[in-house]
Amino acid sequence: MPTLDDAAPLAQAPPFADMFGFDGTMLMARQSQQQGGRGGQPAKIQQAITVDSADVGKILGFRGATQQAMEARTGAHIFVQNIDGADTDRIIVEGDDESVKKGVELVQGVLEKGAEAFELPSGRRQPNKKVEAEA
């Protein structure tokens, strides 16, 4: 009866590899390309910005509207990472080098000046302007 000691090492290609025309190195190269490694795709990087928990809403906006607009403008993925037991959270900006640079600048600007300064939706209601009828 065969035992686990008799099993072929995992480094060897499976016996059906010849039948289907692939080997393990091609599969590993594809996975590397999908993860942002070799193959022409830029590598993803992340940059974290620590903010007060009270300021997270400025970045997210109403129902995520500010966050989505910033992602569309910069091409970076922007999300919040909660820090348990702390009064601060992390804003993570992820993407290629250029989009992360733009995203970090925009996040810092929104924290300092507000979303309206960058013509981003904030989710804040605008006061109703009553139009007075002239007599």
Image (cartoon, rainbow, N blue to C red):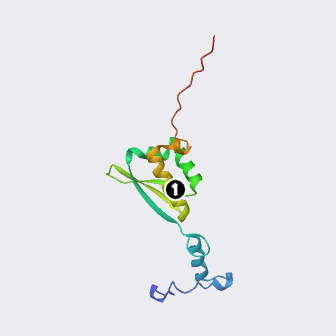
Crowding near pointer 1: few (<14 within 10 Å), some, many (20+)?
many
Q: Residue furthest top?
A: 135
User: Left or right: where does residue 130 sit relative to residue 49?
Assistant: right
> In terms of secondary structure, where does tag 1 sit?
helix
Q: Quadrant of the C terminus?
A: top right
Q: Position of residue 13 (x, y in %)?
A: 58, 85
* Residue at 50% from the left image edge and 65% from the top image edge: 45
Report the amino acid beneath label 1: Gly
* Residue at 57% from the left image edge and 55% from the top image edge: 74
Determine whether 131 is above or below 46 in the image.
above
Q: Position of residue 63 (x, y in %)?
A: 52, 42
Which residue is label 1 attached to?
103
Q: Position of residue 88 (x, y in %)?
A: 35, 51
> Splitting the image into 4 quarters, where does residue 31 fall?
bottom right
Which residue is nearer to you in this view: 71 or 86? 71
Determine whether 10 is above or below 110 in the image.
below
Which residue is nearer to you in this view: 108 or 83? 108
Determine whether 129 is above or below 55 in the image.
above
Which residue is nearer to you in this view: 25 or 20? 25
